[in-house]
Image (tube, grey):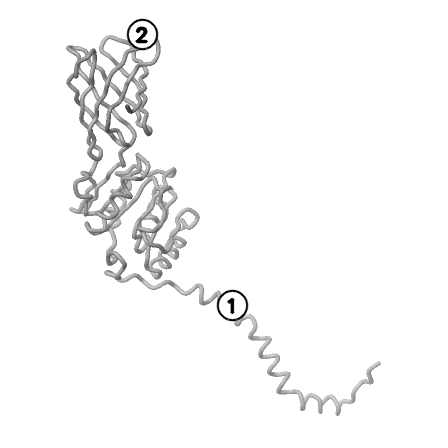
Amino acid sequence: MRKPCTDAEAAARSENHGPALRSRRAFIAALPLIAAAPALRAQAPAPEPELGTPGKDAGWIPTPTGMVEAMLELAGVTKSDYVVDLGSGDGRIPILAGKLFGSQALGIELNGDLVAYSIQEAKRAGVADRVQFIRGDIFATDYSRATVITLFMTPSVLRRLRPKLLAMKPGTRILSYLFALEEWEPDEWAWSEGMHGMLWVVPASAGGHWQVRTVGASPSSYALRLAQRFQKIDGAVRIGGADRPRWDATLRGERIRFTALEGERRHDFTGTVAGDGMAGLLHVTGEPQRQWIASRA
C-alpha cells in the first residue's frame, strides 16, 4: 500500500509538475477542436464559378435557366430518364432535371472546382440522391446509359462528338443550346427569351433492302428499298412486281412509318426497327389490319 503524502509533500509535487499538468489539460481540452478540423475544412464552400472559366474544349458560359427548362420539356424528360450533361459547368442542367422532372442525372466536367461547386449545389437543392457529378473528359468518359444528352458546345467540338452521338441507342434524345450538329437537322426546336435550343432523336439504321411479309392467313410479301440520311428516309415499295409511289416516310428513333399507293389502295406500314429486323402493323384499304415483319436482305 502506498503511504499517503503530507500536505507539504503534495504542494511540492504540484509545484514541480504544475507546468506539465497544465499543458496536458490544455491539450486534452483542445482535442475536440483538433478532431473537428478536417470536417471544418471539408465544409468550406466551393468557389463561385466565374464566367469564361477556361476548359479543355471551351470556356464556361451557363445556359440560361429558362432555356434549360424549355429544352428538357421539349425532350419530354421524366423520372424514368437518365440525363447526362456533357461539360456540366455549374451543374444547373442535371440539378434542374432532377429537381423539376425527377430524373436521374449525371454531369461530366473537366474543371475540378466546377465539379465541387456542382456537388455542393446538388446537396443544397436536395437532389444529391439522384444527381451526380464527376470530373472527366467528355471524349473519354462512358455515358452510353444516357437516354437524354444535353450540350452547349462550339461547332468544332460538336463535329467531333457527332459520330459518338449517332452511335447512341436509337431513341436517345440530344439537346443542344444555340449550336447545331451541322447537316444533321434538328427534329424540333425550343425557344426562350429570343434564344433557341434544338432536339435530335438518334435514328435507328433503316437503310438498305428489306424483305417484308405479312403474318397470318393469306400472307403477302413486299420488297422495300430505303435510302437513309440521318433521320430522313426515302425509297420504294415493290407490290405485285412493280415499284409503287411511296410517301409519308418518317423515322423517329426506332419507330418507322411509310405508305405505298397501289392504285386507289393505301398500304400503311407502322413499326419499329431493331438491328436487321423490323416489325409492326399494316393496314391496307378495305382489309383487316395485319402484322408484318421484315429482314434486311
The secondary element bearing badge 2 is classed as: loop
Q: Is residue 167 left or right of residue 3?
A: left
Q: Nearer the viewer, residue 159 or 14?
A: 159
Q: Earlier in the sequence, mark 2 or mark 1?
A: 1
> Looking at the picture, how far across and down is residue 210, in whole percent?
26, 22
Do the numbered discs 2 and 1 sit on residues whose CB atoms are within 8 Å? no
The circle drawn on residue 36 is 1
Could you tell me which residue is drawn at 31 percent across and 39 percent down? 168
Which one is in front in this view, the residue at disc 2 or the one at disc 1?
2
User: Callout 2: 10 Å neighbours few (<14), some, many (20+)?
Assistant: few
Could you tell me which residue is drawn at 31 percent across and 48 percent down? 85
Q: Is residue 206 left or right of residue 128?
A: left
Residue that numbered label 2 is attached to: 218
Q: Nearer the viewer, residue 3 or 244?
A: 244
Occupied quadrant, residue 248: top left
Give the position of the C terminus as an image quadrant. Answer: top left
Real-space CA distance between mark 2 and mark 1, rounded to the nearest whole angstrom: 80 Å
The circle drawn on residue 73 is none
**53, above or below 96, in the image:** below
Give the position of the N terminus as an image quadrant. Answer: bottom right
> Looking at the picture, how far across and down is residue 10, in whole percent?
73, 88
**26, above or below 191, in the image:** below
Could you tell me which residue is drawn at 27 percent across and 59 percent down? 55
> Looking at the picture, how far across and down is residue 213, in whole percent?
30, 15
Q: Residue furthest right?
A: 1
